[in-house]
Amino acid sequence: MTWTFRRMMEVLGAAALLGLSAFAVYWLGAQERGRIVEQGQSVSATVVATHDSRWADSSDVAYRLDGATHRARLYGTWHGTLEAGTRITVFRDPADPVRLATAEGYATDESTLWPLPMAAVAGALALAAVLSRYAARRRDSR
């Protein structure tokens, strides 16, 4: 495959679309989490476990409501600050009581995880396009 200027621009365009999509997913998720925090029922919860990963962290929380103990897994972006034993406030979505969010941006919705890998792939595509075009020009000039 010859990396022409046009091919590089096509790949850069795809990278830009993916990057904008990552931003849109992040922004829409932040709006949804904000709605839950504003309109939801606040409940005190305890972080019972944390799960560190390379891309995103998750934490298991337990909270009591209506005489029953409930558990949920909260997802956040990378390098979260929740530690086991910490007391936090979670907010229950009035439209879907299984969904929780925190004012710090954690939520039970796994789509919280998508913006970071989408942005990473967009960056990798852009870098690959530029480097491939540069290598093709050097090869052609010899």
Image (cartoon, rainbow, N blue to C red):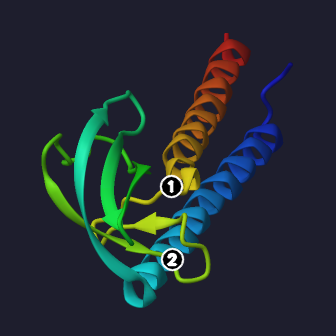
The CA distance from mark 1 to mark 2 is: 16 Å
According to the picture, the residue beneath numbered tag 1 turns out to be: 112
Q: Which numbered disc, 1 or 2, marks the residue that appears first in the sequence?
A: 2
Q: Would you say the residues marked 1 and 2 are in contact, meaning their CB atoms lie under 8 Å apart?
A: no
Q: Quadrant of residue 70?
A: bottom left
Camera-side mark, 1 or 2 = 2
| Quadrant assignment for the N terminus | top right
Residue found at x 31% / y 59% = 63
Across the whole image, how many numbered discs are drawn on residues?
A: 2
Residue found at x 56% / y 33% = 124
Q: Residues within 10 Å of mark 1 (few under 14, many from 20)?
A: many
According to the picture, the residue beneath numbered tag 2 turns out to be: 93
Position above or below: 129 against 19: above
Q: Which amino acid does label 2 sit on?
A: Asp
Q: Find residue 11 and report its horizontal and vertical position in percent.
A: 74, 42
Q: Which residue lies furthest to the bottom in this view?
A: 39
Q: How crowded is mark 2: few (under 14 residues within 10 Å), some or many (20 or more)?
A: many
Q: Check disc 2 and report its element: helix, strand or loop.
A: loop
Residue found at x 59% / y 45% = 118
Position above or below: 16 against 4: below
| Quadrant assignment for the C terminus | top right
